[in-house]
Image: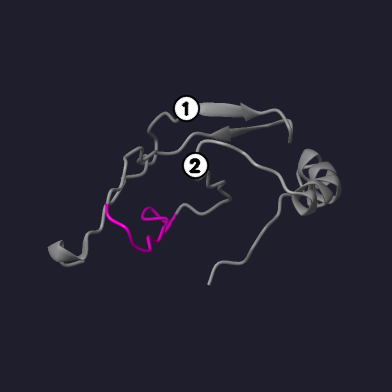
């Protein structure tokens, strides 16, 4: 990327590097804690997040954006369907393109 594109790259953990985990009580599962970015972006505009696997390890991930969880009625209804699947290790897989 050219330097004037305003891209901010947050490096991932390297293979073999110890990774911290966190427990998510709703799904009753532990996940690796990934790198984080915690900055105030002052410039108004559209921002894009891209996730990639530079080491080509593959696998599932969870992306967390923001600090507060807010659930709509639709979210609660989806949770009633999907939480039992998550607890049975039937994660919500989406094909990457």
Secondary structure at numbered mark 1: loop
- The magenta segment: 43-56
**Closest to the observer, 5 or 85:** 5
Residue drawn at the location 28% of the way across and 48% of the way down:
42
Q: Is residue 72 magenta?
A: no
Number of the label disc, if any, that sits on residue 12: none
- Residue 49 image point, x, y percent: 41, 57
Whether tag 2 and tag 1 are in contact, CB under 8 A, the answer is no
**Closest to the observer, 48 or 31:** 48
Residue drawn at the location 56% of the way across and 51% of the way down:
59
Q: What crowding class fits label 2: few (fewer than 14 Cα within 10 Å), some (14-19), or many (20 or more)?
A: few
| Left or right: 38 as drawn, with respect to 74 | left
**Closest to the observer, 91 or 56:** 91
- Residue 2 image point, x, y percent: 16, 67
Which residue was labeled with disc 1? 20
Q: Is residue 23 above or below residue 43?
A: above
Magenta stretch secondary structure, dominant? loop
Q: What crowding class fits label 1: few (fewer than 14 Cα within 10 Å), some (14-19), or many (20 or more)?
A: few
Which residue was labeled with disc 2? 66
Q: Residue furthest bottom?
A: 97
Q: Is residue 73 above or below residue 96?
A: above
Q: Is residue 51 magenta?
A: yes
- Residue 32 image point, x, y percent: 53, 35
Q: Is residue 8 above or below residue 17?
A: below
- Residue 28 image point, x, y percent: 73, 30
Q: Quadrant location of residue 54? A: bottom left
| Distance CA(mark 2)–CA(mark 1) | 19 Å
Among numbered discs 2 and 1, the one appearing first in the sequence: 1
Secondary structure at numbered mark 2: loop
| Left or right: 78 as drawn, with respect to 14 | right
């Amino acid at each position: 990327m050219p330097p004037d594109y305003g891209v901010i790259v947050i490096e991932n953990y390297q293979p073999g590097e110890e990774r911290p985990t966190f427990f998510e009580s709703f799904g009753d599962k532990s996940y690796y804690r990934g790198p984080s970015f915690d900055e105030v972006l002052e410039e108004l505009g559209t921002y894009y997040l891209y996730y990639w696997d530079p080491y080509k390890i593959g696998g599932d991930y969870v992306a967390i954006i923001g600090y507060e969880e807010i659930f709509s009625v639709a979210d609660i209804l989806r949770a009633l369907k999907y939480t039992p699947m998550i607890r049975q290790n039937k994660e919500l897989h989406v094909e990457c393109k």
